[in-house]
Image (cartoon, coloured by chain):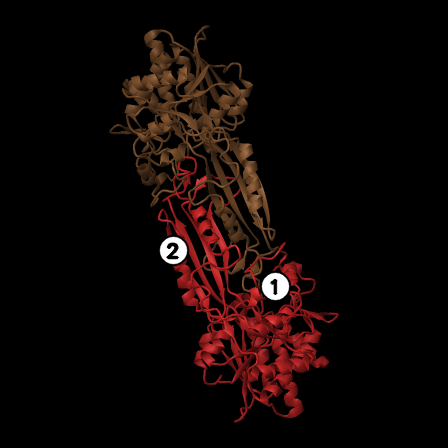
Chain colours: A red, B brown
Amino acid sequence: MSQKQLDEFFDYLRFPSISTDSNHKSDVNACADSLVAKFTSMGLSVEKHETPGHPVIVAKSESKDGLLTVLIYGHYDVQPVDPVEEWDTPPFEPTLVGDKIFCRGATDNKGQNFAHILGVEETLKEEGELPVNVIFLLEGEEEIGSPNLAPFLREHKDELKCDICAVSDTGMIGPGIPTMTYGLRGIACLEFIVRGPTLDLHSGVYGGAVPNPALIAAQIVSKLHDENGKILIPGFYDKVVPLEDWEREMWAKLPDGEQATIDETGVKGLWGEAGYTALEQRWGRPTAEVNGIGGGYQGEGSKTVIPREAMAKLSFRLVADQDPADILKLASDYLNSLCPDSCTIEVELGHDGPAYVMDPNSKYGKAAQTALKETFNDAARLIREGGSIPIIQAFKDILDVDTLLLGLALPDCQIHAPNESFTVTNFEAGIKLNRALLKELAK
Amino acid sequence: MSQKQLDEFFDYLRFPSISTDSNHKSDVNACADSLVAKFTSMGLSVEKHETPGHPVIVAKSESKDGLLTVLIYGHYDVQPVDPVEEWDTPPFEPTLVGDKIFCRGATDNKGQNFAHILGVEETLKEEGELPVNVIFLLEGEEEIGSPNLAPFLREHKDELKCDICAVSDTGMIGPGIPTMTYGLRGIACLEFIVRGPTLDLHSGVYGGAVPNPALIAAQIVSKLHDENGKILIPGFYDKVVPLEDWEREMWAKLPDGEQATIDETGVKGLWGEAGYTALEQRWGRPTAEVNGIGGGYQGEGSKTVIPREAMAKLSFRLVADQDPADILKLASDYLNSLCPDSCTIEVELGHDGPAYVMDPNSKYGKAAQTALKETFNDAARLIREGGSIPIIQAFKDILDVDTLLLGLALPDCQIHAPNESFTVTNFEAGIKLNRALLKELAK
């Protein structure tokens, strides 16, 4: 990597492109313009598309018949920097300390997408042409939930036609360990409210003879799991695709997931579905979580009421082939069945999305594994992640393509937090990885 | 009852003696002064005692050796009137509609204590002397928890020496049904917090492998009762004095407690300890209630976190001979035993007070029953109430006397709410009851 490349990266990082803050709208726009300039200088045809929010940049290499088309997605917007006083260096002044570049957006996602850009630039310079057709798709609204991306994909479906997507916005198991994510969990959210008396009651006058919605909400929540952490909703596991032996074997060889989970979260001990390791529980098994519970008096001291209502917000992380709508229906029926006749329960369904899994040993998957091995000189680890990335599902649904998730985020890179960093090592690796990936995919 | 008596009562009601509102401090004081004037006019020796809050008025009849001494307690302060727009008449302008006098404080407690005052006045006028020594104790801080009353009792223990207390600040089963309350439940409060991860976690990244404090708090709460509503805290019932046959028989003959509980609270159905009626559950059995529960995200929509902590506020209503400190210890031990090793639990103890029960068939109890029968021309119903009245326990602890609870509040009198009322019928009955009570106690 040249000093020029590092300088260009630093210039890119300096834009405070905070998408959620309207005061930074012009900064987001200037950052988009810098990408337009960069792609133009590389000889790509580039379009800046305005949206109701921030611009989408699409840059294409010269399209050649017979070549595979690879869509490389990234985002140039970043998270806010609060609390700013916890930063050791100015959040938008990239600062090199040892191997680490500290700056907001260094890892998430500017470093990772700029490495792809520089990889393509290097190939063009050295080879004169690319082994595949490349479409860069860079949005400025990922940190606010990509509200305009799916509509954009639908509207520009034809011009974005491709064979495979590549996204570097996930994590690596550890420094130097090449990692491909081939699965993400889905999600289904709901909220229920238990209602009892018409008003908060005096717990002395009425206590003992009337139902207490806070108690009943707790009893309902307690029936989500058995003592082995198994979810008790009838039919919940019916469509779950069991983990395959090779997955469990590969994950068992990764750095200790149990200890990592404890270290990263600060819990005193683990909890979960019996018979599975922490990584299996986090990546490959569905969950039922209470995201919030509330009812009655929560202030200082005591107020001896029987509350009129209590609620809980639940979310389910899903795996293939669970259907989110099915799960919400099953959960809703179960919750209704648990509410005693003395109270009423109302279940309100929230957002949902299915799990995503691609075959890591498909031809594109194998190519990505080879590219990772070439880059890091080590066999790629194949993992899933526990969260959901809705855009990946949108690529599948709208563009009908799988996505290679080739993230370079390290466990200690502090994305979304103060002192975010990206290592020079991984920035260089990202450039190499892009070149190797396009070459392997072309084969 | 004369028009003059009604006019005097109305004048007493007109003082907006709201003890909790510092803007009304002078009104509270003026109300106290009006009592001083009234007692003076009756020939009682009266003292106005300043306290750190509002004054305590003590008025004594001429003390005669060999006579029983009866302490009559009441309070001249009232609740606020908010929401004032829901009043159909001005809150502090007593308004007679049919048999009902609408005014803040009409029932709670000015009407009830002024009836005692007028009863004593009538006896003095008609008989020239009282059959017992009377001490009136009227405080101005009942609605704010009587913070200065127990210290006052301790300080003036000798001058308040008496044989029995009489308090009219409880309720009647229904219009025209004489009611004596001989028991009150005690209380013990605590709060527990379950802590897990050091920060709210992403439920996608970590969900399935780490303990969720909101889930665990719910699981703990769900283990307070078995499916029959029995409390599962080991030792909880050990010292509970079972209800006696006569109590259950008497309560069974009262107006339908099940239907009344449903009508008053608006619940769809009842809930409670199997094997007991609603009135037995409310008056004679201990409870474990969740007064509040909270953890995680409770706002609009969803936030898919695993919360770092969750809490619940519990209160236990106690019956004789449960010791509040014992119960808090047992509950605390039980809660600690329910928390899995993966989390920590912290239990913080709150306020408590023992149950109060007097023998309604003691000589003073019998006298009160006879007085009620004379007044209402019907046998007194003997009930308990589910709430706690800490001052009654203070009379027991500091003055070493029982209290006759001879309340005249009707179920529809709206104390603490807009449109509070007291019936002229009960005001007259209160005057009669005072005269009959003092006569019967003297026997």
Q: Secondary structure at mark 1?
A: loop
Examine the rendered structure and indicate whether residue A279 appears above or below residue B51: below
Are the residues flagged by discs 1 and 2 in contact, CB closer than 8 Å? no
Report the disc number at residue A81: 1
Q: Nearer the viewer, residue B420 or A363?
A: A363
Q: Which residue is mark 2?
A: A336
Examine the rendered structure and indicate whether residue A105 appears above or below residue B332: below
**Label 1 neighbour load within 10 Å: few <14, some 14-19, many 20+:** many
Q: Earlier in the sequence, mark 1 or mark 2?
A: 1
| Residue B103 in which image quadrant | top left
Residue type, label 2: Asn
Q: Is residue B136 left or right of residue B177?
A: right
Q: Position of residue A241 (x, y in %)?
A: 49, 71
Q: Is residue A412 left or right of residue A204?
A: right
Q: Position of residue B97 (x, y in %)?
A: 26, 30
Report the disc number at residue B323: none
